[in-house]
């Protein structure tokens, strides 16, 4: 099995999992809602860290606690991503007996080539085949076999099931890019706009949050948000102004020491107006995607990793990375 050099994925160690709601829902870990969870290995979103490789017939067996309800009329629906949204490996079949799901690979999966960097998320459990239990913390255990005759390795983690839909949520997405591409982790030269737009899905009160864009930082009033403000166009005029419009979150900058000039901005139309959340189509779609926020990141003057954190007020935060090199 091809594993990351991280000690967390060492061959003789159990595989730790981070279990969280998928990026495309705000209620995937909420009590009584359909289960929509991802089981992520360490550094899942970093394409430079290799994941797991499987031979034909290799498998992943996942046991959900009995408190999760199997919805018999819904077929099993899982995906096995390479670590970021819209980037599954190929090819596998999935089945279930009660609350035990088995994913079996029908072709080899390698850490290089078209499936690089290999399996980084053991499963995205979706499709309404299961329903979440009451609020609480639950263990989820998996057995990983690199080939049909290989000894099983244990993977495990816990998931927190919430009592109610979060007040606000932000999640990274690659809806703006061709399938398999990833905006986080792209490599750009210094002082240049990243070619791929960063994409985020925004929710508030369980509904997509439209009309949000990026404004420059205002350190005197919002010292936490050193990389910019997330602002909602309250009056619908297509222009972001303060005071007047609503600050719904912000960006916490993180850059190589001494770097200057880095920025996160809303892309603009020909007339100079910002493109706000809910106004842009996804890749290959013909309709705007509700809550989809596009962001253009420009690198600063120093090479290294730029890792801004995007946060929604009253909700969570997510971090993305743009790697920067000298020309």
Image (cartoon, grey):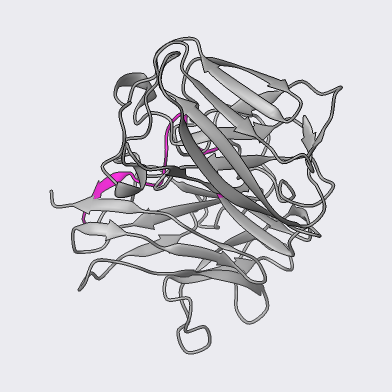
Picture coordinates of residue 109 (x, y %)? 39, 19
Picture coordinates of residue 136 (x, y %)? 74, 58
The residue that appears at 52% across and 54% down in the rendered structure is 271
- Judge by depth and name the residue closer to the eye, 58 or 109: 58
- Judge by depth and name the residue closer to the eye, 221 or 276: 221
Q: Is residue 314 visible?
A: yes
The residue that appears at 78% across and 57% down in the rendered structure is 135
Question: Is residue 90 part of the magenta span, yes or no?
Answer: no
Q: From what the image shows, is residue 269 above or below residue 123? A: below
Examine the image and state in which quarter residue 153 appears. top left
The residue that appears at 63% across and 60% down in the rendered structure is 212
Q: Quadrant of the N terminus?
A: top left
- For the stretch drawn in magenta, what is the main secondary structure? loop
Count the labels in the image. Answer: 0
Q: Is residue 179 visible?
A: no
Q: From what the image shows, is residue 311 above or below residue 243? A: above
Q: Which residues are magenta?
A: 172-190
Picture coordinates of residue 15 (x, y %)? 44, 42
Q: Is residue 66 left or right of residue 64?
A: right
Examine the image and state in which quarter residue 196 appears. top left
Question: Is residue 189 part of the magenta span, yes or no?
Answer: yes
The residue that appears at 29% across and 46% down in the rendered structure is 6
């Amino acid at each position: 099995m091809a594993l990351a050099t991280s000690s967390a994925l060492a061959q003789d160690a159990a595989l730790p999992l981070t279990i969280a709601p998928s990026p495309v829902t705000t209620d995937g870990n909420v009590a009584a809602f359909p289960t929509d969870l991802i089981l992520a290995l360490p550094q899942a979103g970093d394409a430079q860290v290799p994941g797991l490789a499987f031979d034909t017939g290799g498998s992943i067996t996942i046991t959900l606690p009995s408190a999760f309800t199997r919805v018999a009329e819904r077929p099993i629906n899982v995906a096995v991503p390479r670590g970021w949204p819209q980037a599954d490996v190929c090819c596998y079949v999935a089945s279930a007996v009660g609350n035990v799901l088995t994913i079996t690979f029908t072709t080899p999966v390698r850490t290089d080539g078209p499936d690089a960097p290999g399996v980084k998320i053991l499963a995205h459990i979706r499709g309404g085949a299961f329903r979440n239990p009451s609020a609480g913390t639950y263990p989820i255990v998996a057995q990983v076999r690199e080939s049909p005759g290989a000894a099983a390795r244990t993977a495990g983690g816990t998931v927190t099931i919430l009592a109610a839909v979060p007040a606000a949520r932000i999640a990274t997405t690659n809806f703006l890019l061709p399938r398999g591409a990833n905006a986080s982790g792209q490599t750009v030269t210094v002082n240049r706009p990243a070619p791929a737009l960063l994409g985020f899905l925004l929710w508030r009160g369980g509904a997509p949050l439209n009309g949000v864009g990026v404004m420059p930082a205002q350190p005197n009033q919002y010292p936490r948000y050193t990389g910019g403000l997330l602002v909602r166009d309250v009056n619908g005029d297509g222009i972001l102004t303060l005071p007047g419009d609503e600050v719904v979150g912000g960006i916490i900058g993180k850059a190589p020491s001494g770097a200057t000039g880095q920025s996160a901005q809303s892309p603009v139309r020909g007339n100079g107006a910002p493109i706000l959340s809910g106004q842009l189509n996804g890749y290959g779609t013909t309709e705007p995607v509700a809550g989809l926020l596009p962001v253009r990141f420009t690198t600063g003057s120093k090479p290294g990793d730029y890792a801004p954190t995007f946060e929604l007020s009253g909700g969570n935060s997510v971090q993305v990375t743009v790697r920067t090199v000298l020309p």
